[in-house]
Image (tube, rainbow, N blue to C red):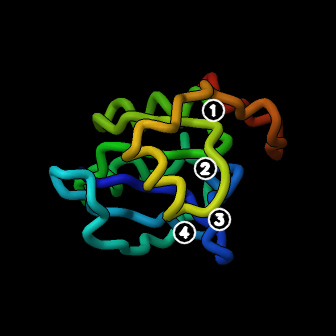
Amino acid sequence: MKIAVPTKKDHQIDNHFGHCEFYTIFSVSDSNEILTETILESPQDCGCKSNIAYDLSELGVNIMLAGGIGDGAINKLASQDIQVVSNCKGDVQQLVENYLAGKIQDGGSNCASHGHDEGHICSTN
C-alpha cells in the first residue's frame, strides 16, 4: 500500500491539498509497517485542475490523507482509484501511523473553508 499526504516544510500536513509544498509518499508493508518515505513535488495548482491524481496513481498511491480538500479533487483522485481520507491534521508520520492503527476517520470535503482566485469552485470541476 502507498499513502500520500500533502505536506508543508515543517513535516505537518498542509491544510489545502492542491496548494501544498510537496506530497510525502509512504510505502507500507502488508503488516502495516512504514517501509519508505519519498517526496513528490507539488504542481502548485488546484488539485482538481492539475494532473496530480494521475501522477500519484502512476507511483502506486492508493490512499490520500488530506487536510482541506474539495469534491472536485476527491472525484479526480477517485477516478484514479485513490481513496481520500480528509480533514486530517498534524505531523505526517504520526498521521500515517494513526491511520494504520485505525484511529483516523474521513471528515468529508471541506474546500469551502479555503479561498480560490477568480471564482473557482472545486466542487463543480
Q: Earlier in the sequence, mark 1 or mark 2?
A: 2
What distance separates the C-alpha of mark 1 from that of mark 2?
A: 9 Å
The mark lying in front, picked from 4 and 3, is: 3
Which is nearer the N-term, disc 1 or disc 4? 4
Which mark is drawn over residue 12? 3
Q: Position of residue 75 (x, y in %)?
A: 46, 28
Q: Are marks 1 and 2 in contact (CB under 8 Å)?
A: yes
Q: Going 71% across and 51% down the picture, which residue do you hit?
A: 15
Inspect the image, locate mark 1, and give the three-letter code of the amino acid beneath it: Gly
Marks 2 and 3, how far apart at CA: 12 Å
Q: Are marks 3 and 1 in contact (CB under 8 Å)?
A: no
Give me the disc on residue 22. Answer: 4
The kind of secondary structure element at disc 1 is loop
Asked if the residue under mark 4 is in contact with the one under mark 1, i.e. CB atoms within 8 Å, the reply is: no
Point out the tag, 3 or 1, that comes first from the N-terminus.
3
Q: Earlier in the sequence, mark 2 or mark 3?
A: 3
Q: Which residue is mark 1?
A: 70
Between circles 2 and 3, the one closer to the viewer is 3
Q: Is residue 114 left or right of residue 87?
A: right
The label number, if any, that marks residue 47 in the structure image: none
- Label 2 neighbourhood size at 10 Å, few (<14), some (14-19), many (20+)? many
**SS type, badge 4:** strand
Residue 58 position within the rendered picture, expressed as x and y whole percent measured from the top left: 24, 55
Q: Is residue 100 left or right of residue 106?
A: left
Which kind of residue does numbered mark 4 sit on? Phe
Separation of residues labelled 3 and 1 (CA atoms): 19 Å
Residue identifier under label 2: 17
Front-most of 8 and 44?
8
Alpha carbon of mark 2 to alpha carbon of mark 4: how far? 10 Å
Q: Are marks 4 and 3 in contact (CB under 8 Å)?
A: no
- Say which amino acid is labelled 3: Gln
